[in-house]
Amino acid sequence: MEQDAIQQAAEQLADSLIKQKLMAVTAESCTGGGIAQVLTEIPGSSRWFERGFVSYSNEAKQELLGVNVATLEAHGAVSEETALEMARGAVAHSRGHVSVAVTGIAGPDGGTPDKPVGTVWIAWGQKLGYAEAQCFLFEGDRHAVRQQTILAALQGLNDRLQ
């Protein structure tokens, strides 16, 4: 069922991007490229998907997306601040017009009392530097958390393109 919802969200996104003549870019940590995979499974995606960054390590977030070391030290990789910098950096380091960035704890390890497993920050950015982020707490195993993250990321981008 969730796979159908993800597919529908991806196809809706493709339609919106084509109509608005926009290119999308992804910056992914906890989903490991899953959003980009879903999007590029759609035939003709090169018309509206520009590139995807998989920035799993803090160093990759810094090198690929320009996330500030001070941000990571002060707030951690799984934070609103980092997600926002990832979303802005994805657009700044690409030819994309809109971006989605995800950073979270998919589990089964890595959770803390402040940031339990299933904590995911998703941020959406635009070429002119605007970005906004939202925190989610997803339930289930690693696969379930990642699938829910992919769906929420796509739905959020769709909402912002309406």
Image (cartoon, rainbow, N blue to C red):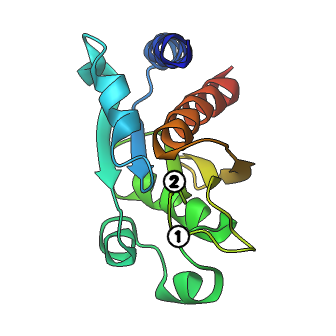
Label 1 belongs to which residue?
110
Nearer to me, 151 or 14: 151
Q: Is residue 132 left or right of residue 13?
A: right
User: Do the residues bearing badges 2 and 1 touch, measured as CB atoms within 8 Å?
Assistant: yes
Q: How many marks?
A: 2
Q: Residues within 10 Å of mark 1 (few under 14, many from 20)?
A: few
In the rendering, at what x and y percent does residue 72 appear?
53, 82
Nearer to me, 70 or 58: 58
Nearer to me, 73 or 109: 109
Name the residue type under label 1.
Gly
Name the quadrant containing residue 44: top left
Label 2 belongs to which residue?
106
**Quadrant where the image shows the C terminus:** top right
Q: Is residue 145 left or right of residue 95?
A: right
What residue is rendered at 61% in x and 49% in y?
122
Q: Is residue 72 above or below residue 44?
A: below
Name the residue type under label 2.
Ala
SS label for mark 2: loop
